[in-house]
Image (cartoon, rainbow, N blue to C red):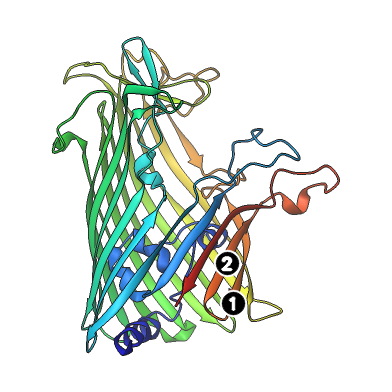
Amino acid sequence: MKTLRLVVAAAVALCCVSAFATNARVESMGKNSTFIMDDMSIFDNPANMNLYPNFLIGELGNYLYPNGSVEAGQNRDPLNPWFGGIFSLGIGAEKAISIGGVLGRRDERLLGFIPDYVVSGRDYIKTPEPVTNFDGFLGANINNVALGAHIYIAHQQGLDGNNAINSGAFASAMQLDIGTNIEISSRHAFELSLGSARIQYGPEDQDIFDMDLFSFFGRARAFSKIDAINGHLIPAVSIYNTYALGDREKLNLNLGIGVDAAFDRGFFWMGLNGFYDIEKAGLNWWSSASDLTYYEVKDYGKTQETSRLWQLGGTISFGIERNIWWDWFVIRVGGQKTIAYADYKPAEGQEGASILCPSSAVTGNCSQSGNYFITNPINDGTREDNVGFGFGVNIEEKLKVDATVAEDLLFRNPFQGGSRLMSRISATYSF
């Protein structure tokens, strides 16, 4: 246990704002964790599991149902609950090994590339929801160098999204990544992670090592201490190159700079992230008026046309939290604003609306090219919109429960009823 205390002490000395956190904390305090060092970063860099030994983490789920799907006075179970934990063991002076697992978590970055329906001949197969959804972690800390590996598996076949037996139903997402977190000195740290993922959906069989299905990504960031603000300067860079069937590809480049600062009973961060996205989709991909996505199993040949959408812009974001009234109660607020320039070019011969078209399949014109400005949603309650608000409860620095408050809560008429008070509730327990 002495080794574990040294690991945590080193993390606190280097990044004094390291914290056990949750999706609810991130969602209500700036909407992203690019410039925050917390335990949710284990999904971006598995080496960071060594900084948070022996803890349990879980989420009751979120209440982000589409508008109109929850009537006033109606109760529905939350979406996508999950749980897991990390356990560590000291094996000598300044050495430790860690192992962990998470069950039920949806990786939206991967699963977002899976269509709602697969069209095979005359059959419209509702794509199944993956049910395995497992994250596995293995890590070690050796003389101020943290190492980690992570695997993610989400799979379902034979049972479609309507819970009907269907041999053509298939959906799978797998990811393997490795990372390191190096304490260069008492004032500087550097972390790097690299990985690959494989996305597939039915009914056609694919070779497991088909390189057309593999995606690649890398992330890096650094923390440099700034005494003047009792915080850090945080440069960050990432690249994601994601492939899917039907000539679908997305390249995303990010370059950002941020700062954090600890103050009396609180913490503040802000950052600016610039990005360049280019996404392509073949004639196999189209969308409906209800924004459902379809992938058609059809060979258009190697020279098929592709729709293209590229974006160049940036996101400025901030987050702040502070203990108020009592030491065990914290309140949080944060926000983000994205502005980008976009250019859309449809594929020749696209009969339906391409999934990349910015207009509705009914009200818009997806057959013409055009360029325009875009921004993030204003207030749809998701992690992508402008502002978040929430609170947390800290019981003896062991059990921590965080909640994201529904954004319309303070504007709602209490005598008319409402669908929800919170949009997400998460928790961690350290031991």
Cα distance between the residues tagged 2 and 1? 9 Å
- Of all residues shown, which one is farthest toward the top? 122
Q: Quadrant of residue 131?
A: top left
- Kind of element beneath mark 2: strand
Q: In this view of the protein, which residue sits in the foreground, 279 or 422?
A: 422
Question: Is residue 223 rendered to the left or right of residue 209?
Answer: right
Residue at 27% in and 85% down: 185
Between 108 and 268, the one nearer to me in the picture: 108
Is residue 131 visible in the rendered image? The answer is: yes
Q: Where is residue 398 in the image (x, y as percent from the top left)?
A: 52, 77
Q: Are marks 2 and 1 in contact (CB under 8 Å)?
A: yes
Is residue 236 placed above or below 301 in the rendered structure? below
At horizontal 47% and vertical 84% (from top left) the residue drawn is: 230
Badge 2 local density, few (<14 within 10 Å), some, or many (20+)? many
Residue 314 vs 53, above or below: the answer is above
Along the viewing direction, whichever of 390 and 53 lies nearer the viewer: 53
Q: Name the residue under label 2.
A: 401
Decide which of tag 2 and tag 1 comes sooner along the chain. 1
What residue type is disc 2 on?
Val
Instruction: Using the rendered view, name the quadrant where residue 223 is placed.
Output: bottom left
Q: Position of residue 322 (x, y in %)?
A: 61, 75
Q: Looking at the rendering, in which quadrant would you find the C terminus?
A: bottom left
Disc 1: which residue = 395
Can residue 222 be spotted in the picture?
A: no
Residue for point 14% across, 35% down: 210
The kind of secondary structure element at disc 1 is: strand
Report crowding for label 1: few under 14, some 14 to 19, many 20 or more residues within 10 A (C-alpha): few
For this view, does 421 lie left or right of residue 228?
A: right
